[in-house]
Image (spheres, grey):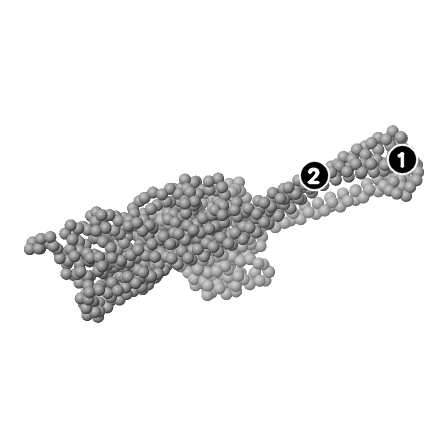
Amino acid sequence: MAITGSRFRTKFVLVAGVGLVIGLTLAALASLQGIRSLGGDASDEIRNGLERASREYLTNHIEDTARRVEFYHGRARAELGVLAAVTQTLIDQQDALAPLTAAATTTAPLRDALVYNPAGDWSQTAEGEPSAVVWGYLHAPADPDKPGLRDIKPEVRAAVERTALLDLLLPPLLQHGAEKQAMYFIGPAGAEYLRIAPWADAAGHADKQYPGHNASPFWSFYFPGIVEGWQRWIGDPARMRDPAAQVTGTSPYTDAGGSGAIMTLFQPLWDASRTQFAGAVGVDVTLSQLIRHVQDLQLASSGFAFLAQENGNVFAVNDDGKHILGLQQVSGSSGAGVDIFQQFLHQSRDAAIRALALPSGDAVDYRDPVAIGGQDYVVVLKRLEPFNAWSGSADIKPERWTLGFVVPAAEIYSSLINAQATIAASSRGILTSQIVITLVALAVVMLGIFLVSRRMTSALSDLAAGAGKIAQKDYDVRVDVRSSDEFGALGRAFNQMAAEIRAYTHNLESLVEQRTAELQRASREIMALNERLKQENLRLGAELDVARRLQLMVLPPDRELAELDGLEVAGYMRPADEVGGDYYDVLRHAGGVKIGIGDVTGHGLESGVLMLMIQTAVRTLQAAEERDAERFLNIVNKVLYQNIQRVGLDRTATLVLLDYSQGVLRLTGQHEEAVVVRRGGSIERIDTVDLGMPVGLEVDIATFIAHTELRLSPGDVVVLYTDGITEAEDIHGEQYGIERLCEAVHRVHERTAAEIKQAIIDDVMRFIGAQKVFDDITTVVIKRR
């Protein structure tokens, strides 16, 4: 026994020690994981807070900046609107203001002393006078008596004089408000003279910069298509009522005169009837203030802003931003006289910028992160308000600039990175402390386990000896109980178990006999129940077979169908269960033929009974010679409704009745569509949804019943069916559908009605394949001979 106790003690110490080591190790790992999880949660919370704060800040900042950019742009449009309103008034009140304009042309400050330049072939006022230019093609032919001199066409000179009052308005508008390089008026086709402030050698400058300009009309040379684009608006009353909606701008471009980036805004003018183009006022807006504002925006330490056109051309960005975005500047041209600087996002040296799509909505577009040049950035984009833009043709479209912020993600999340480093250092210190505590706890606990195991060994040795005697069938064995602890309780339980084993062994035979008798009685009862179930199944099967045979017996036989005058009719019905809920019938009467088809909801015995009720009601009314189709259907509905209420069923049925006489087929009632295939192969689908409602649902449906008529020619085919055909499913769950039915009928419409019917059934069964048939399948084929 001492050897046994020693072995147990060794195993106990070993198992307890290993378990303790594993437990302490898992506890240490759990603590470390908890610390890491806590650090991760803290990092996530910090990141989420920083992200929310930065998103809110950048969103508000970009919206404020967008409003300021729109203010710069909108202020110039407003000042242009003032000039346009005054000029349009001069045009509208031309006759009333004629004395005033005539007087103005004789007054020194407003008189246009136009001087002809033979070398340039144009007339222009001298410096210090109100600035006006008349191009060479607006002059009369040369007079042989005046060599080197050409007079301005009289109508052009009169037009120039009518706008002399603008010399009072152009200078003050130019000096105040938005930064502007020039404001001017350009006449309509045939009188495209130029009135501009401030004075400039406009004609001489054009000779140097734009050769050939003087031989072509101003609008088509400098801004081809723009007048045609404006004239398209004449048919738009809303646009014509709102002059501000007509303002049209060019793309930003580099001024040939050295003023930096500018853009031109035009507002067209119209005659008093608003049906003819009467010229336009324009302003060359200096974009330097706007661009400086965008370039000077400070975002974190090294973030920047940019402004781009809708086509991705970035025209405002600082040098660092241009480098980070990888922009490559090239030059191009949008017309004969406007050079455009171009640096497109989609032509960037960086793949992420090339793939950067500008926003399509009005909300702030926040993107985090975007990898640019191997570094993560936060990109925020905001579309500005739209304005009309000319792009070199008559197609004037709305243009929307996009304001963008680009901020390094590391600058936004710098506090998060520092917090993560602090958490990592703390985690390493906690891990070291946890290892020391674990080793000390392991030594103390192992000593305690060794001491306790010695006390446990003696009691376990006694229990082992007692168990050995029970194994040798000595059921009188007992162990000494020397304590009141758990080992004492185990000894007392062992003694009680030994006594019970002894008593049970002596009573085992009587218990076996008792259980055997009980099992035999239960077996006889089960056999009796099985016999009763067998008899009940036979009875129910016989009843269902009778119902099925009765249902099939009332279907019209082939001999009755063969006797129909002028029609071939073939029918088919296959119930999904022993008894189905589909109905069809063909009845002759003195005036022609009545054909019915319907579908009771559900299937099985109850649906089959309702089907027989419908068949009986229809035959009874037919025998009673009821000829009113609407009244006929309403009476059938009332009979079925009353029977349903009596037996307490929750069923209804779709039902359509067809009356044929002398080539006309009249349809009454609601059911599936009727498919009509004409002799030539064309297909018609007759919807019956508006011809009635389900029968058995309401006691009176007279107000819902309608009819439609269909004329049949020899060779025409009509196919009726229930939803068991169109909703039949293959093994993949796809339904057969009305389109497949139409195709199947179309392929064989020249055959007999019986052959068409069989072709339909064969096609449906091939489609179903190995899938189970879930609903009754019924079809009726009608063909006029």
Q: Amino acid at mark 2?
A: Thr
- Residue drawn at x 17%, y 63% as measured from the top left: 158
- Residue drawn at x 28%, y 49% as measured from the top left: 256
- Residue drawn at x 47%, y 55% as measured from the top left: 61
CA distance separating discs 2 and 1: 42 Å
- The x and y percentages for residue 662 are 36, 56
- The x and y percentages for residue 454 are 87, 35
Which labelled disc corresponds to residue 584?
none
Q: Nearer the viewer, mark 2 or mark 1?
A: 2
- The x and y percentages for residue 652 are 53, 58
Residue 355: quadrant of the picture: top left
Does residue 36 appear in this view?
Answer: yes
Which labelled disc corresponds to residue 432?
2
Question: Please, which residue is most extreme toward the left here?
Answer: 145
- Residue drawn at x 29%, y 64% as measured from the top left: 85
User: Which residue does the numbered mark 1 point to in the structure image?
Assistant: 458
Do labels 2 and 1 touch, CB within 8 Å?
no
Q: Quick one: 404 or 244, which is closer to the camera?
A: 404
Question: Please, which residue is most extreme toward the front here?
Answer: 128
- Is 351 left, or right, of 602 in this rendering? left
Q: Secondary structure at mark 2?
A: helix
Q: Amino acid at mark 1?
A: Ser
Classify 684 as above or below 476: below
- The x and y percentages for residue 106 are 18, 66
Classify 728 as above or below 594: above
Question: Please, which residue is most extreme toward the top here?
Answer: 3
Which callout, 2 or 1, points at the residue further toward the start of the chain?
Answer: 2
- Is 699 left, or right, of 687 in this rendering? right
Q: Residues within 10 Å of mark 1 (few under 14, many from 20)?
A: some
Q: Secondary structure at mark 1?
A: helix
Q: Quick one: 545 or 415, which is closer to the camera?
A: 415
Q: Quick one: 111 or 631, which is closer to the camera?
A: 111
